[in-house]
Structures are given as structure tokens and as C-alpha cells.
Image: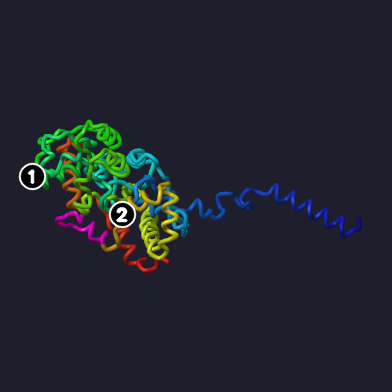
Amino acid sequence: MNTRQRLSSLFICVLVLTLSCAPSRFLVSKQTLAPSVQETAQVLQLGCSRDWAGWWPWAIAQEQAFLEANEIKIELQWFDDYYAALAAIAEGTLDANCQVFNDTVEMESRSVNGEVVVLVTDYSSGNDKIIVTGEIASPAALKHKHIGVERGKLTDFLLTLVLEKVGMKRDAVKIEDLSTIDAATAFVAGKLDAIVVWQPDWLVALKRPGSRELFSSKDFSGSIPQVIAVSQTALNQKMDAVQFLVKSWFKSLHFINQNPDLSREIMLTHSQLSDAKFEMFSQGIHLLSVDENIRALTPGNNFDHLGFTAQKAAQFLTEAGLLAEQPNLTTLFDDRPLRAYRQNDLGRES
């Protein structure tokens, strides 16, 4: 080794020793490094039931990578059990959830972080049905009949609307409190005269010879909304993520309009249904536009407005004994994320 090489090696050794013994103020600590995107991102946890047709567009958002951008990430968790998702947001383990509006009215006061509706995804438009035997020729013939329905749930609410429509009180019929699948099974076995059920259990019920649809949610347009409920805590702390959630939803609907065949393929694969059932259930919902959402979140005197629906639902839930008293409905809605989307992003989905 020549003199220059020896001097160079000596310099490197001295430099390493100097740095290793240097006071901590000269070192770049982990805490002073620029935070990573993952550490600074607003992450919003969204729950969604897998089997409701109105929520299948989220499969497109997931497939097309619409759920992450600009240091915001939506963590979508699919649930096979709808009630497990409902419990998760109530317990505070989800920031947001896709759920039936009636359940939101019922659970709002019981949720540890509160629940606020920021968007209506769809209205049931036929996917909830009253199925009757062939002997029931008209609504009036429901009197004194045994009807299977899940007490206090949206199907029971639909039954109440039907009875009101035909001028009949609830005590004029004999109500059996059964889950939808148990009601369908009992109906097929000949133990009930009528049932009120949602997809896909009315397909089971229609296997009974002579059975038919008497009414459906299509006859009461807007009465059974599905919504995105966000915890009040998430709304306070993650408003950017909530606004991005709304944007992601409408971006998915725009994609459906622009790419119908690919969208159908994605949602069909997600649904794990046959072509026939997929089409049937897809036709049983109405996806709301931006303008329809704006109208839904403004006051009104019919089912096009959630305030009206909330009052009807609260009255029903109170009379059914599921609420001790009428809830405070003034804090149940927040249209700021929706209006921000309309102002800043509408027309720029692609």
C-alpha cells in the first residue's frame, strides 16, 4: 500500500470514529425525518354489507383504485353479516358504514361516537316485498292473517306503510316476529299466510305454489333509503376523508355510466350470483344522483326527504318499543361533504 492509500484509510477511520462519538445534536434522529405518506394520511374505515345491490358500486371503487389519493385512504371492509357491520360502527371500530336509514335512526343515540348521514346511496325499489298466499286476493284480505316479519326492522316498517295505505291497524293482523329467512321458510312450509322480506329471501318464499307479491318497496318510493353513516368523531377529525368518501362513491357511479359492461362484470363477480339473480336484484334498487341527494338532505314533506322519513321511522320505532322516546333528529344529517363535492368535483370524475 502506498503513502496516499495509507493516508486515505487513516482519514476514513478517523471520520467514522468521530461520527460515532459525536454528540446527539449532530445526528439526524428518527423523529426529525420527514413523516411518510402512510403516517400522515387520513385513513377512514368504511364497513359495507356484501349482499345489498345498492352497495355493489363499492366493488368498482375497490377494483379501479378509487379509494386512495392525496394522502387519504378509504379502508373498505366487506361484511357477510349486515348486523355485524351495524354493531361495528356503533361500537366505534368503524368510522363509517353503509346501512339502512331506519337502523341509523334507531342506533344514533346508542353509538359511542354518534352517527351522521352524509349520503344516500340508494332507495329500495322492489327488493323488499310482501309475499302472500294465493288465497289473499286483495290487501283487505290480510285482516286476521298470520304475517311473518322481523319486528322493528325495515320490513316491519314497510308492513306498517302497507296497513296504513289500506286503512288497517296493526292489531287487525297477527304478526309473528321472525327473521327474514325463518319467515320465508315458515311461509313455504304453510305456517304463515304472508311475509315481509328482503332480497334474496323472497325468492325462497315464491317457491310456495300460488304465492305472489302483494306490495313491494317500489310502491312506496323513497321510504326505504340506504345511507352512508359516519361517526360524529370521524366527521370532526377526518372531514377531508369524508369528502373523499363522497367523491369516491360518485366516481364509481360515473364509471358505471361510462363503462357499463366492465362495471357489470366487476359487480357480478363481487355478488357471486347468477346472471338472472344479479339482474333481478339490480333492478330492485334506485341509485341516487347528486341532485337527488341534495334534495334528500333538505327539509320536505314526503319520502324524497330524509327529514320526513326520519320522523316516520322514529314514530314507528317508538311505537314498536325499540326506542324509549323520540330521538333528536336535528343532528342526524350533514350535507357539507355532499355540497363540497358538487361545488369542487362534480363533472371531474374521470
Residue type pointed to by label 2:
Gln
First in sequence: mark 2 or mark 1?
Answer: 1
Q: Which residue is mark 2?
A: 283
Q: Secondary structure at mark 1?
A: loop
The color scheme shown is: rainbow
Vertical side of 240 occupied by 343: above or below: below
Q: Is residue 64 left or right of residue 234?
A: right
Residue 77, horizontal then vertical, whole percent: 42, 45
- Closer to us: 262 or 152: 262
Q: Residue at x 87, y 57 (%)?
A: 5
Q: Residue at x 68, y 49 (%)?
A: 22
**Can the viewer see residue 315?**
no
Residue 105, horizontal then vertical, whole percent: 23, 44
Residue 344, horizontal then vertical, whole percent: 35, 66
Which quadrant of the rendered structure holds the N terminus?
Answer: bottom right
In reply to whether residue 187 is colored magenta, the answer given is: no
Residue type pointed to by label 1:
Gly
Q: Residue at x 39, y 61 (%)?
A: 256
- Closer to us: 20 or 303: 303
Seen as rendered, the residue at the extreme bottom is 347
Seen as rendered, the residue at the extreme right is 2
Q: Is residue 32 left or right of residue 131?
A: right
Query: How far is mark 2 from mark 1, CA to CA?
Result: 29 Å
Vertical side of 82 occupied by 6: above or below: below
**Mark 1 surroundings: few (<14), some (14-19) or many (≥20) residues within 10 A:** few
Q: Which residue is mark 1?
A: 167
Q: Which residues are magenta?
A: 292-305
Which quadrant of the rendered structure holds the C terminus?
Answer: bottom left
Quarter-wise, where is residue 192 in the image? top left
